[in-house]
Image (cartoon, rainbow, N blue to C red):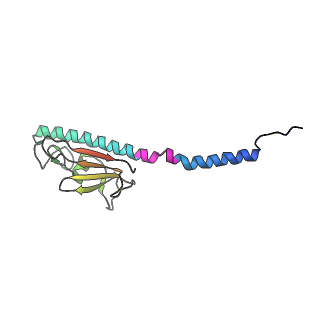
Amino acid sequence: MKRAAGFTLIELVVVIIILGILAVTAAPKFINLQSDARVSTLEGLEGAFKGANALVFSKAAIAGKEQDSDTTLDIGGATDPKIRFGYLQGDEASIKEALQIELATSGGATLADWYFVADSPSAGIVTIYQSGSPYSATDDCHIEYTPAASAGALPTYNVESDDC
C-alpha cells in the first residue's frame, strides 16, 4: 500500500494563520494612508496659499500697493491683511483672513485644523502644521512660508513632509 504525501489540514490552517498575522503587521508599513493623507493636505495648503497670494498681489497691484514694504489691503473680509511688496506678510491674522482657514497659535487652548508658529517674526518666516501631525524642531511635517523680501521678489513655500 502506498502512503499519501501532502499537507494535513492542521498544517494548512497553521500556515494560513501565520501568513494572516504577517500580513496584518506588515501591511501598514507598506500602505501608510495616514502619512499620504498628511502630505496631500500639506500640498493642498501650499496650493491654496499660492492661489490666495496671487489674488492678494492682483488686488495690491490694482490698488498701487505692490511696492510698499508694510501696509494693509482691503480684500473684502472682516479684517485687512498685512501685505509686504504685494504679498501676504507672515502673521497669523493675515494668513487666516486671506486663506479662510481655522488657524491657531501652537500651544494655545484653541482647537484648530492648522497651527501657526512664528519662526522668525522679524523676517516674517512662519511654519504651519496640521492638527494631529508630528511637530517639533526635528519633525518635517509642515509648510514654511517666507514672504517676499523685496519689490519684485516672490514669496517662498517649503513643504517638509519627510516625517509625516
Residue at the far right in the pictured view:
1
Give the side of residue 10 with respect to residue 127, left or right.
right
The image quarter containing residue 59 is top left
Look at the image and tell me in which quarter the N terminus lies. top right
The image quarter containing residue 87 is top left
Residue 47: image location, x then y, percent: 30, 40
Of 157 and 102, the residue lying toward us: 157
Q: Residue at x 18, y 45 (%)?
A: 148
Of 161 and 60, the residue lying toward us: 161
Instruction: From the image, give the main secondary structure of the stretch colored magenta.
Output: helix
Residue 31 part of the magenta-drawn span: yes
Residue 16: image location, x then y, percent: 67, 45
- Above/below status of 12 relative to 123: above
Residue 126: image location, x then y, percent: 25, 53
* Residue range of the region highlighted in magenta in the rendering: 28-37
Q: How many marks?
A: 0
Residue at the far front in the pictured view:
2
Give the side of residue 45 with respect to residue 14, left or right.
left
Residue 117 part of the magenta-drawn span: no
Of 101 and 31, the residue lying toward us: 31
Residue 5: image location, x then y, percent: 79, 40
